[in-house]
Image: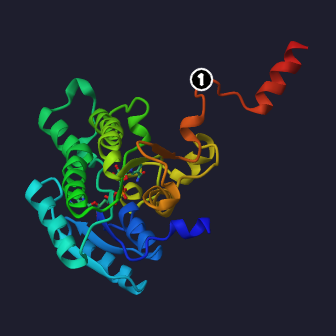
Amino acid sequence: MVLERLRLDGRTAIVAGAGGGGIGTATSLTLAEAGADIVAVDIDAERVEDTKRRVGELGRKCLGIVADIRQKTDVERVVSQAVKEFGAVHYVANVAGGMKDDQWGEVLEYGERQFDEVISLNLRYAFLVCQAAAKSMVELGIKGSMVSVASVSGLAGAPYHGPYGAAKAGLMALTRTMAVELGPRGIRVNAVAPGSVKTPRVMAMASRDIDESSKTTIPIGKPCQPDDIAAGILFLLSDLARSVSGHTLVIDGGATAKFSLTGRTPEQIEEQKQARG
Ligand SMILES: NC(=O)c1ccc[n+]([C@@H]2O[C@H](COP(=O)([O-])OP(=O)(O)OC[C@H]3O[C@@H](n4cnc5c(N)ncnc54)[C@H](O)[C@@H]3O)[C@@H](O)[C@H]2O)c1
């Protein structure tokens, strides 16, 4: 019976940043496969259409909405259109985020406008979406669940992407606060923190072979796929995680579990032992 608790049948999920073939698309398809109807939100109209078509192919309903989720009026429109179409919002997945190429840079030189832009797309919008969705859940008496996509860049230093790391660390802190405040209303709030994920956006920016470098930097020897992150989001949204709130699930193939100061391989350890006699 435990697997029944993973099903989302008859319920509705807003996915913010649902296009692009990366984590947002994988999340929309995964939640639809688990039985949810999807509200696919993206700033790019073609991406919305693509996700809508793919959710439809799984036999679920999908309301596609083109919106800039950094704008409060757009976010409120998304929630009210979702309620009008499906009656209520039960789940939220905040997936949009990331950095453009020209937003990387040293703290010494970093511009304040760029800093604000990165915070806006990686922290501030999630506050807007969670606030609007939670208000609707409270009003309609829905015991809902929300998950935001943070990053391992918010767990340790984020060299040359300082505002991104700060935004994702803030997102994890906000997740804990919302979990405490909304728990008594029956709403759970969690986050996932991915490591390296092979999404089209990241692959287009990559200056090195991610598969090759992952063999040494990631304990399981490979980067995550978008649906690995979607699987974590499904778990946290579902009743399988009914006692989990305020948590950040790290999904990084063990990368952050590794103590980076010892770089010795078993062969090197053996060599050193023999050299010592
Ligand atoms: N890919 C990785 O390696 C990785 C690692 C850690 C964390 N993450 C996080 O995962 C999330 C998704 O990453 P991805 O690589 O799949 O990203 P992506 O850019 O492929 O997908 C995000 C989608 O959000 C949409 N979007 C962007 N701005 C928007 C806005 N203002 N309003 C509405 N939609 C908007 C984009 O059009 C895109 O379709 C991000 O939050 C990112 O920070 C990614």
The relative height of residue 93 versus residue 81 in the rendered view (above or below) is: above
Q: Which quadrant, please, contains the C terminus?
A: top right
Circle 1 — which element? loop
147 or 144: nearer the eye?
144
| Residue 184 image offset from top left, x and y in percent | 33, 46
- Dot 1: few (<14), some (14–19), or many (≥20) neighbours within 10 Å? few
Tell me what residue is drawn at x 23 percent, y 58 percent. 133
Across and down, in percent, residue 187 comes to 34, 53
Quadrant position of ligand 1: bottom left
Residue for point 22% across, 47% down = 127
Q: Residue furthest top?
A: 276
Evaluate whether residue 225 shows in this view: no
Q: Amino acid at mark 1?
A: Leu
Q: Quadrant of residue 49?
A: bottom left
Nearer the observer, 1 or 68: 1
Question: Could you say which is closer to the camera, residue 85 or residue 268?
Answer: 85
The x, y position of residue 81, in whole percent, is 16, 72
Residue drawn at (56%, 53%), measured in percent from left and top? 211
Colouring mode (rainbow / by chain / secondary structure / one colour): rainbow
Residue that badge 1 annotates = 261
Q: With 115 as the anchor, is 54 left or right in this view?
A: right
Residue 76 shows in this picture: yes
Question: In the figure, is residue 234 to the left or right of 92?
Answer: right
- Residue displayed at 49% across by 63% down: 227
